[in-house]
Image (tube, grey):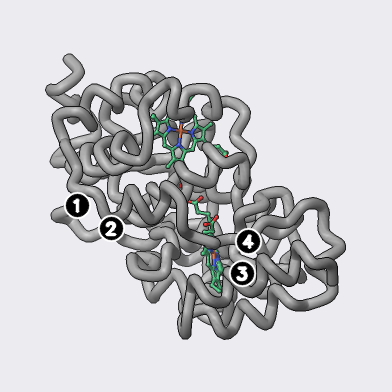
Amino acid sequence: MNQRHLFQVAILAAAVGTAGTLWAEEASDADRVHRAEPVDWNQGGGEQDAALHLEPDIENGMDVYEVCAACHLPEGWGTPDGTFPQLAGQHRGVLIKQMADIRAQNRDNPTMYPFSLPQSIGDAQALADVVAYIESLPMNPAWGKGPYGPGTEEYALGEQLYKDNCVKCHGEVGMGDVEKFYPRINGQHYEYMVRQFEWIRDHKRRNANPEMVEQIKNFSDKDMQAVISYTSWQPVPEEQLADSADWKNPDFE
Ligand code: HEC
Ligand code: HEC
């Protein structure tokens, strides 16, 4: 293990405290050192911490969101074909972490990268603001679902895989964990999730949680499709959804 990695493991362990004991051990695994440019999945600090603690200005957040709307749509719903993820409904901490990771190039997103930069939208305050605005948006009631609905063999397989491998982090119905930066995955588009899952499994999404990578390393493509399809069929609390799939964001009419 080289010096840099030792240092990273040390600050990583310090930053996450007790919540991180499990994957701090993971991170010291010799295997991880040899992967292509791994990054510590949640080193924290910097603008991520700053943005989490700033008082958001939602008016400015709306101004910042204008550029995001070009891809994620004015409603924040992304696209069911999975090109753009739904942002509405995602946890505040997750949105801030992913933005900070994309800006720091810890998560590759060449499409969005230039639009995410401080020169384009502003510093940590802009992150806090835009995320507060996103939080005000209701979710898409017609998100992209997987091909295997309830009653199919694959749904049953997905359910079993989900219970055995995902519940402990993403929760019973995929609500994630606000405190631990675990994303909610219910209500997210199937195609987007399949891409992310595959990238996490194959070490392409560099900011992925090493414990999740370990958990899913033996998943075949069939297992992956089954478990993600199952996830995409889980319910979203009614009060978080827009009244209709035709709802338009009045701020951008
Ligand atoms: C040019 C198109 C484009 C623009 C503009 C854009 N994004 Fe994105 N964004 C994407 C794409 C594509 C992805 C998914 C990348 C992938 O598949 O890994 C993404 C992913 C994200 C994610 C990660 C979601 C998750 O579930 O992990 C967040 C958060 C995000 N965008 C927020 C924003 C915000 C806020 C803005 C405006 C400041 C913005 N994006 C502007 C294209 C864009
Ligand atoms: C040890 C905890 C853990 C386990 C177990 C786990 N995940 Fe994750 N998952 C995470 C974290 C944390 C992230 C976000 C990583 C990051 O910040 O980039 C994530 C990200 C994801 C994403 C991408 C979400 C997005 O918005 O981009 C999907 C999809 C996903 N997980 C599905 C699953 C499924 C399905 C399982 C079970 C087969 C699973 N995960 C098991 C912690 C976990």
Q: Distance from label 2 to label 1 (Cα)?
A: 7 Å
Element marked by disc 1: helix
Q: Earlier in the sequence, mark 1 or mark 3?
A: 3
Nearest the eye: 242 or 216: 216
Q: Which mark is residue 251?
A: none
Q: Distance from label 3 to label 4 (Cα)?
A: 13 Å
113 in relation to 233, above or below: above
Amino acid tagged 1: Gln
**Structural crowding at the residue carrying mark 2, measured as other residues with C-alpha within 10 Å and reported as few (<14), some (14–19) or many (≥20):** many
Q: Distance from label 1 to label 4 (Cα)?
A: 32 Å
Of circles 3 and 4, which is in front?
Answer: 4
Q: Distance from label 2 to label 3 (Cα)?
A: 23 Å
3 in relation to 116, above or below: below
**Structural crowding at the residue carrying mark 4, measured as other residues with C-alpha within 10 Å and reported as few (<14), some (14–19) or many (≥20):** many
Mark 2 and mark 1 in contact? Answer it, CB < 8 Å.
yes
Amino acid tagged 2: Val
Q: Earlier in the sequence, mark 3 or mark 4?
A: 4
Q: Distance from label 1 to label 3 (Cα)?
A: 27 Å
* Residue that mark 3 sits on: 212
Tell me, yes or no, if residue 193 can be seen here: yes
Nearest the eye: 27 or 156: 27
**Structural crowding at the residue carrying mark 3, measured as other residues with C-alpha within 10 Å and reported as few (<14), some (14–19) or many (≥20):** some
* Residue that mark 4 sits on: 40
- Residue 95 position in % (x across, y down): 39, 48
Q: Earlier in the sequence, mark 1 or mark 4?
A: 4
- Residue 15 position in % (x across, y down): 49, 71
Residue at the image point whose x is 70% and y is 73% from the top: 27
Q: Which mark is residue 236?
A: 2
Q: Which mark is residue 240?
A: 1
